[in-house]
Image (cartoon, helix red, strand yellow):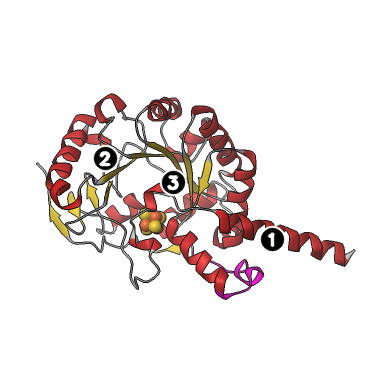
Amino acid sequence: MTGVYFNSINSDFRKLKKFIEKMEIPSHCIFCEGVDLTIKEPKHHPSYEITTACNLNCIFCYSNVALKNKTAPKPGYYGDLSPKAITISQYGEPLLVGCEKVAYIIKKLKERFGDVSGDVRIDLQTNGVFLDMDKLDGLVDIVMISLDGFGKNYSKLTGVDAFDKVINALRDVAKADCIGVVRSIHMPGINDEDLVKIAKMCDEIGINEFFLQPLSVYEENAEKLLKAGLNISKTENLAEFIKVVAKIQEKVCVNVKIPGCILSNLKDLMRKYDFEDLMLLKRNSLATSPPKIRREWRFVIE
Ligand code: SF4
């Protein structure tokens, strides 16, 4: 009996190891220092921050925490002056200022960096509620829409009843000339079932990537998350996260991805250590405050 038990554990580990080995980094992580293991203190690739405000009130939000702790960025461009990719934006909801204004900012960024960087990639990070692809098609290369809950659960997790709007936005993204990505935070005990539904919906709509991220629990959000059912020990367990990702991938065609920096480090560790030992690794999911952006602030577009 014990032999059968261990054989099945070994075969699960082998499957998981193969899954990780075959996994490729998300489109958004290409060009990010995070995937270059030769860089000691990698920085996220450049971003243009538009606003720290948001129309949603997600229970895990780091922007809100940064605002309270005064570590949130002021508007403007952060990063080196020969970017290959620019994220719009890491904080807040950029489309709060309107899609026309965001389109204007993107055009100005492309003009400014066109000579040095050529065709700089523009990655729009949004919750999708105000997305109007007619105004942005042809200007954005990757559109990443955050979606962490399905149906009614979406409203519980964000505080706003806008699930249908987000689904419509995803349908528009799938038809547009860009890579469409759904970005979700895995909150064990809260949205496990939702993630499977979201992945299936990505298939149905024709979304290119489903980008899953592990949760960071900020002190300010801990009570809300625990009340919603968060399983904190699973949140700290890296193997648990990878297993969830692998299980979802088994059920869908959309490419399920994890952060490139996590994947690159994991692959590197897999070359050095036993996979079984690595799967015992715990990540520190408790965070006190989102750190200030470490890239230099350069300019703002009026
Ligand atoms: S997830 Fe990691 S590798 Fe990807 S863009 Fe963010 S910091 Fe870079």
Let me know if residue 132 appears in the view. Answer: no
Asked whether 9 or 67 is in front, the reply is: 9
* Residue at 60% from the left image edge and 44% from the top image edge: 249
> Where are the magenta residues, as a range?
272-284
Side of 117 relative to 3 (left or right): left
Side of 12 relative to 212 (left or right): right
| Residue at the spot of label 2 | 94
Q: Amino acid at mark 1?
A: Arg
User: Which callout, 1 or 2, points at the residue further toward the start of the chain?
Assistant: 1
Q: Answer few, some or many: residues within 10 Å of disc 2's Cα (few below 14, many 20 plus, some between 14 and 19).
A: many
Q: Answer few, some or many: residues within 10 Å of disc 3's Cα (few below 14, many 20 plus, some between 14 and 19).
A: some
| Residue at the spot of label 1 | 14
Q: Nearer the viewer, mark 3 or mark 1?
A: 1
User: Which callout, 3 or 1, points at the residue further toward the start of the chain?
Assistant: 1
Q: Amino acid at mark 2?
A: Pro
Q: Amino acid at mark 3?
A: Ile
Percent x, y of residue 231: 59, 54
Q: CA distance from mark 2 to mark 3?
A: 19 Å
> Split into 4 quadrants, where in the image is the C terminus?
top left
